[in-house]
Amino acid sequence: MPDLRRSLCYSCNRDGQDQGPVGGKSGDMVVFSLLILSGMCVMAAVLHGLAALRRPFDRTQSIFAGMCLAIVGYGISQVVCFTANDVPTYLAGLKSNFLSICIFIPLYGYFIRCYTGKGSLKVLHVVSLCFAGLAVLNFWQTNSLQFDSAIRLQQFKLPWSESVTLATGKISLALQFGILLVVGVLSYGVYALVSVWQRDHSGTVAAMLLAGILFLMSTVQGGLVRLGLLDFIHLPPFVFMLMPVIMGTALDRESTRRLRASERRFRSLVEQSPFSIQVLTPQGETIQVNRAWEQLWGLAPEDMVGYSLLEDPQLTEKGAMPYLRRGFGGEATEVPALVYNPADDPQLKGPPRDRWVGAYVYPIKDGDGRISDVILVHQDVTDKKRTDDAIQLVAAAVSSSANDEFFEQLVINLALVFGASDAFIAVKDPKLEHALRTLAYSANGRVVGERLIPLIGSAAGEVLRQGKEMCIHDVQRRFPQDSLLSDLGAVDFVATPLRGSKGEVLGLLGLSDTRPLTHIEQNMRILEIFAARVASELQRQQAETHIRHMAYHDYLTGLPNRAQLHEWLSGVGGVDSAEQNLPKNALLLIDLDHFKTINDALGHEVGDELLKAVANRLQTIVASEARLARLGGDEFVIMLSSDTDIQSRAFAMAARVMAGLSQLLDVGERSFSVGASIGVALFPTEGGTEADILRHADLALYEAKKSGRGAVNLFKASLQTAVANRLQLEEGLRNALGNQELQLRFQPQLGRREGVAGAEVLLRWKHPQLGYVPPVDFIPVAEETGGIHAIGSWVLNEACRHLSDWVRAAVPFDGHLSINVSAWQFSRPDFVEQVRDALLEHAVPPHRLMLELTESALLYDLQETIEKLQALRSHGVGVALDDFGTGYSSLAYLRDLPLDQLKIDKSFIAELGDETEHPLVESIIDIGRNMGLVVMAEGVETEAHCQRLIELGCEYFQGYFFARPLTEEDFLSWLDEGHVVAPV
């Protein structure tokens, strides 16, 4: 094996002997050959560099130009080495030689990557960095990249008697690594070119592959020579410098092939394009046109000989020339659509009709930036122009008046677009089963009255059956039963269905003419636009109607609502001022009796169904005589008018309503007899407003309910006064407690045996302006406004306070105080705690307090009532049932209620006499005695009352016969005067 520690660069002859001292005859032929090849590489670098700079920039050509320059450096440095006479000169050439290799090999790798598309750029970047490191190491080492020690020069004699300079020395590891990198990159080039060759057997690829194989083989040979493993001349410089010839020729052929392919693609694109394309010279002369262009203009290429687009007077006249000159000047330009008429240019042989043609001008520039060709793309926009015109006509209709005028304007414009004599818009009508009703009909440019479009045996019916737009020629022959088209003398009929957003058919848009219609196919798109706009407007109107219906009608019953009622009232003449002081209208406000009870007991679903049934019944009663509306809840309104005796008509209508609602109403499996109360207000009145009318009816209804329900009441001015008084009471009650206007009175209660058993606490209100207001007037107001809670709490605490004060003052009173408790107060969840807290706060024994409750307060929720009463009695508080006998008076619930006392209502006491029978009072006394309850008679005003009650067995009494309700001071005086004797 040769000694790898000594590298012989052309170092010995074939016999392995030294060639003697340096200075022999130089290799002129070798040097000359390298210089010639270097010159060829310089020319190749210039040519390919210029080719790369053309637009668009060619990266492959630019890299190849760099490779050529690197090879020039490689060849010249090799010449320096071959002709060196001393070591420094040789080393300078050798270092330059290695530098050229470190530049050429990475460029070769990038060239192969660009040409084949194979390989990883990241790997090539790493390889380039390695070669950059070797280049730096090459100049840093004294004896170049190849040697690790000093070298010795000698002459190597070539076979043709010439000699070249060579060197010997110890080779470096860096050289071995560099050779491996070079072989790797060149092997990658061969692999990539083989991959391309497998799919493209062209001569260009074959030449490239041959060059790659030669590079690899010569590099292997040169590496073996450098390593001293092969005794032969170093071939890579010669092979590498042949690269411009082989690879340059291949690149030129590839560029030519691609250019021709591009030209073929361009011509094929122009020929097969659906757009009308004309290729012109920069002077405006035609080079090429495609089939679409010939069909558009009716011309052949030979017809354009001698014609220059830039000299066409018609284009100048139509205003297209400025756009064309801008395009021919190098700027891509759009030429606006212009109309062309064959009659204006006899040379045109296209379709015999006006055409709107637009164009785009595209200048094509060569590699030097000069305009080589101009492409003119024509576009027939006739259909689009007609569509735009149709849209403008639709817009014109939109800008006109709404509703009917919109449709009328639209059918007129549609007839104009199609050149038809008749056009119509027809829609479905629930009342018409076999015909459509026209919304608008245009005949000869004039809007005529409504017509019916038959659907049986007619062209319109066929269009709806097919569900698509249709053009029917010779329509009378095909549909002889179509009476409308027969009367019109129609020849052609065109129509399309009108569809909603969900695809449902709304109607039909159609037109006809007494002559055959032309341009039907082109105009069908316009018909679709008109149909879409009509359908949109129909849906808008339907939505508007639906929204208005929702706004002015009750969702449950479908009746008009409060908003609609206000519109009715505002539309009645003379609402704000009475005409001749005679009302001509009546408003009946109807409220169902006990509807809340049904709703709470059976649920809202049953309640809603009942309201629907009531609405239907009322509609039947009212019919067309009056207007019916639902205000909300269980309130309905009837508004009627009459020029004579409106009051009699109103009461007659009210009587019919009462009779109709008294009859059974079937709701599911149940039947109801619904009563009603009705308030009647007559209008207009002087100064009356809509709000006044409703308020008057409401006041009349309130009075009807007060009279016992199931009544009819007419509003009178006195009701307004009552309302004013009520408002005054409400306002006063809000301030009564704060202003200390409420006072307590005490009416004694006596027992037959023990004398004074207790006293009932009664409430009085002294109004600053009204004086003393009776409880019967202000207690209902307090209950309705919610003020009863504060008032009841105040009475409870005041009664306990008085009891506490009397105990401390040793007042001779050991009885109880009875307090009236409102149903609203008793229903509070914390009522028991409220009573207990009051007793504890004032340290009052619970048995000194008696609570009086009415039957209505106890029966709302019987189980909850029982629990509360048991809790009160467990604390020691007494419970009395007030006004017994006036309500339900059922022994069933009376047995379950934990009571201490029954109070006979004063209405029964007033009827007592010596000789008459009084079974009810006697029964109450017997019931109380049998149930172990104290029975107290209130309202005892005469001695006869007292004696009769004693005879019936009553033991306790209260009334004016014994004492009136007294102030605290008078009550205490009454006690001091000894009025404690029991009734005899």
Image: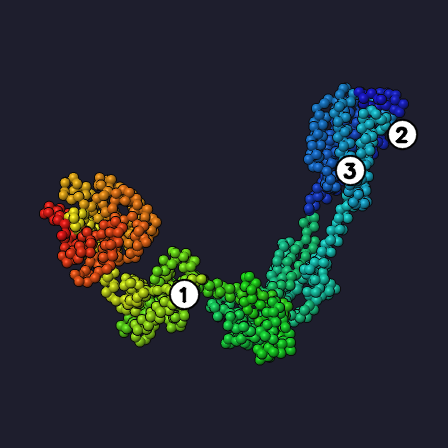
> Could one spot residue 165 in this view of the protein?
no
Mark 3 or 2, closer to the camera: 3
**In x, y percent, where is residue 516?**
63, 75
Toward the viewer: 377 or 403? 403
Which amino acid type is marked by label 2? Trp
Residue at x 29%, y 63% (from the top left corner): 708
* Circle 2 Cα neighbour tier, 10 Å, few/some/many (<14 / 14–19 / ≥20): few
- In this rendering, would 309 be left or right of 644? right
Toward the viewer: 706 or 579? 706
Which amino acid type is marked by label 3? Tyr
Residue at x 62%, y 69% (from the top left corner): 470
- In this rendering, would 597 be left or right of 340? left
Q: Are marks 3 and 2 in contact (CB under 8 Å)?
A: no
Which amino acid type is marked by label 1? Leu
Where is mark 3, residue-wise? 191
Residue at x 33%, y 68% (from the top left corner): 587
Toward the viewer: 967 or 210? 967
Label 3 vs 2, first from the N-terminus: 2
* Circle 3 Cα neighbour tier, 10 Å, few/some/many (<14 / 14–19 / ≥20): some
Residue at x 27%, y 63% (from the top left corner): 707
Task: Report helix, strand or loop for mark 2.
Answer: loop
How far is disc 3 from disc 2 in space, using C-alphas?
A: 37 Å
How far is disc 1 from disc 2 in space, using C-alphas?
A: 135 Å
- Image vertical order of residue 770 relative to residue 213, above or below: below
Where is mark 2, residue-wise? 160
Q: Classify the position of the N terminus by image quarter.
A: top right
- In this rendering, would 581 be left or right of 636? left
Where is mark 1, residue-wise? 665
**In x, y percent, where is residue 91?**
76, 24
